[in-house]
Structure formats: C-alpha cells, structure tokens
Amino acid sequence: MDEMANTSPWEDDKPHEECGVVGIWGSADAAALAALGLHALQHRGQEAAGLVSMEESGIFHSHKGRGLVGDNFGDAAVIAGLPGRAAVGHNRYATTGETALRNVQPLYADFEFGGFAVAHNGNLTNAHTLKRALVRRGCLFQSTTDSEVFVHLIAISLYSTVTDRLIDALKQVQGAYSLVALHNGALLGARDPLGVRPLVIGRLPAGGFVLASETCALDIVGAEFVRDVEPGEIVVIDDAGLRSQKPFAKQPSRFCIFEYIYFARPDSIVEGTPVYDTRKRIGAELARESGVAADVIVPVPDSGVPAAMGYAVEAGLPFELGIIRNHYVGRTFIEPTDQIRHLGVKLKHSANRAIIEGRRVVLVDDSIVRGTTSRKIVEMVRAAGATEVHMRISSPPTTHSCFYGIDTPERSKLLAAKHDVAEMAKIIGADSLAFISLDGLYRALGRPGRDAASPAYCDACFTGDYAIPLLDQQDNAQRPVSLLAAANS
Ligand code: AMP
C-alpha cells in the first residue's frame, strides 16, 4: 500500500481537494516566489506540491512531488529548472491512492492555442456527472482530480480566447473552487459564484502580481495586499495590468465559515479582518455563552490557541499552555494497528502537569469531528491531575460533511451527527461540554446573528444547508471514471 495511506486524519478514501494555490506574474523569480507562497500555505495541504513556470517564449516547465514544499522545492537546482516570469503552484491535501503523482497539480495540457496550466482549491459537486459526459465524448482522463474537468471543458470549448473558454468551462461546473491558471498571454484567477473558497490579489514590490489562497502567502514574498478576488469574478493579469470579468449573475456570497474557525492561518486577513482577531472574538463569545467556574484556560494546540486566549480574557481566568505539542511528529509515521494509532495523540500532545495538577481546567479546541482528539486529550489532562475537565469548542457541532473542499469524514463518522451534547460529553469523558451557538459564531464575525433566509457564510457543516447543489451525491449511478486509482493504491 501507498506509504501515504495513513496520513489523512480521517482514514477514508474519498478524494479531497483541501488545498492552497498561488500564481505569480511579472517577476524574474516567479518560480522561487511561488514556492515561497506555497510554503506559507503549507497548512492547506501537505501531501504533495507542484509548480509550473512559463518562459516568455511560451515554453512551460513543471516540477511536482509528494511531500512538503521544502522537500520538493528547497533545492536551488529545482528552482533553476523552472525559468520564466510567470508561475502557478499548488499544495495538495489528499488521501491514499489519490496522491498518485498524476493527480498532483497544477495540471498541464497542450492546446491549439499553446500550453495551459491550471490548479484549483475546492470541490466540484458535478465533477462525476461532467466526467461521464466528457468520457462519452471521447475525452481521455489522465487523473482523478477535478481540475482535469476544467482542462477538458476548455479543450472542447468553441470560444476563441482562453479567457472565454475558461468562462465557458466555469459556467458548466458547479461547486466551490478558487483556481489559478496560466497560458502564454496571461495569469488567470477565478472564484466560484458564491465565493466559498478564498483567493486574494497582491502586488509585488518590483511590479508584478500574486494570486494566492491567503494573505500569508503575500506576506512571505513582500507583496502588498490589493483585494480579494470577488465571488464569481475572473481576473486576467498580463503585462498591461489586471482586468476583471464577472460573467455570473450577482448573488449573495457564502464564504466558508470554517476558514475562520480552523483552516486559514491565524496571520491571514480574511474579508478585511485578521483571522487571529476573529478567533479571539469567537473565544470571547464562547466564554459569554458557556462560562464555567474554573482555575485555568488551556488551549488544545495549535488550532485552539487564539480562541482560548479570547475565552480567558473574557472569563478573567489565566491562560496557560497546559498541553504541549510536539512539532516533530513525522507525517509518514506508520500506525499499523488500532492500538498504535491510539497512541497518536500522545505522540503529538503531552500534558504539562505543573499547570494542570489540582486545577479545574477548561480546554478550548476549535472543533470536534469524530471525537478522537477530545477523548484522548481529556483523558490525558485527567491523568495529569486535573480535578475537573470542561471542554469548550469554538464552533457549533459538526453535524454534516463538507462537499466544498474541507476534508471531513462521512456523516456517519461525525460524533455530533449521532449524539446530543450531553452524550458527547460522556463519550469524551468531560465534566461538561459546550459549543458556541450558531448565532454566537455569527455575532463574533460581526453579524447580528444567522439570517436563516440569507446566511452570510457557508455553514453547511453545522447546519446541513448546502447552498450549492450536490449533484454527484444525488447521482446514484456515479462510479469512478478511472480504475487506475484502485490499481495504484
Ligand atoms: P476529531 O479528533 O476527529 O474530533 O477531530 C478534531 C480535531 O481535528 C480538532 O482538534 C481540529 O483542530 C482538527 N480538525 C478539524 N477539522 C479538520 C480538518 N478538516 N482537517 C484536519 N484536522 C481537522
């Protein structure tokens, strides 16, 4: 079996597209800058990384590999092999056989108009349906990634310009995506009409543009944040500057609320607000909603840290690092049996007894998915001598799977899909358990509460309100178009 097989936290084998993208236009160091951007976006995907660069003559170069950005692009010789003033890159988060190299983005294809490279973050919800139709028309798929759907739709489009062909393709796909694409004329960026997944525009100090999933990728290359690509917008960047096209009817946007809670890096700015500040406000709201008599507030590192800080300030209680995280747990650590896998959290976290012993502890984490982490952490904190352990979660209960690009297990494996909060508290062994309310979360995001008629965010993982139709899910006849994934795994 593939050595990556155990690296997904969820251990199922559906394809996931929880990724980071970057694009550079107009710099002699395009590939190096794109690699740096990918490094800053490493938290969005650790399974594989890829870069495609383009010389002004229209010659493309590509390098892809499994593993971290530094493992693949840390070598100057690799970057030297990616010449040109433009580049696009991608970090991939995927599972099992799906990490086959042929699935690592950006994907590249030769068209009648020249070379074309594309990388996307997100999930298409009609990819299987489109793929079947395309295969029937004679399209030969080389990978199982949704990005290839874009490639074939562009190939068969009857429009003449590349931008129009891309727009033609985007009008046929449904789903949540942010994409970057490169051809011998422009760097393109696009966001889905609801703007579920993020994409930002930056300006390099010496001229030139950056597109990236998050602003932390602009910071690392010294680029100035210009603005978000708007939902449904296509930006075309070339030596004349940046032009915008909006081919979709305007509709209220639904940015992914889980980017705020967990996924985005805390130093990124989302919708004009630092993610770090937002997480602190969520923690403060959580403390107001479900405060409990305690001695110390302890974050579950690293994702629970800002929320725990906000909680502690609001509760007027000390914030202490009562759990220490080991940052050097290798991602390829083999966990061959359930018993060894159970040790996983102990490899990753250990209790700081000096902080915990004899105290009433409030643990703050961002989410409970299957409940594995919480159960082990609570057990560990009790074993270190806590007199009470209260768990506070800075998201509402995760009751539904995400089909828009956040890696979640199937619904039957979500603890909150099967149990109420009291039952969950028992299962994880906590003296009390509370989640922030949906309205409280919206308040922390600066809204009066959740407007059920027109929610400001995609919150399907907490509500089951799927704003983009899940066509592939409804399509019973869906089968993988490729058998190669099975052969590779
Ligand atoms: P679980 O142990 O299954 O309940 O997972 C909860 C833990 O996983 C929390 O500590 C989260 O920080 C983390 N988490 C939540 N969502 C994701 C995700 N999509 N990918 C990886 N980790 C996640």
Image (cartoon, rainbow, N blue to C red):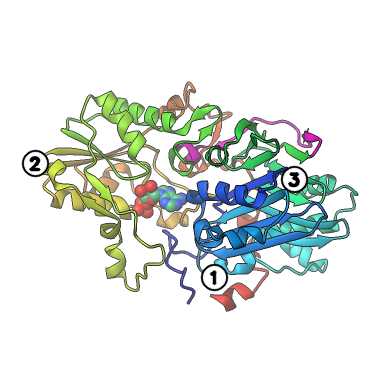
Closer to the chain start, of discs 1 and 2, is 1
Cβ atoms under marks 2 and 3 closer than 8 Å? no
Secondary structure beneath label 1 = helix
Reading the image, the residue beneath label 1 is 97
Position of residue 404 in the picture relative to residue 115 (left or right):
left
Foreground label between 1 and 3: 3
User: What are the residue bounds of the magenta stretch?
Assistant: 239-260
Residue for point 33% across, 27% down: 284
What is the distance, in whole Å, between disc 2 and disc 3 at their CAs? Answer: 59 Å
Q: Amino acid at mark 2?
A: Gly
Residue 225, compared with residue 341, is above or below; it is above
Residue 331 in sight here: yes
Reading the image, the residue beneath label 2 is 358
Residue for point 49% across, 74% down: 2
Estimate the x, y position of residue 187 in percent, counting from the top left: 74, 45
Estimate the x, y position of residue 59 in percent, counting from the top left: 79, 59
Residue 276, compared with residue 186, is above or below; it is above
Closer to the chain start, of discs 2 and 3, is 3
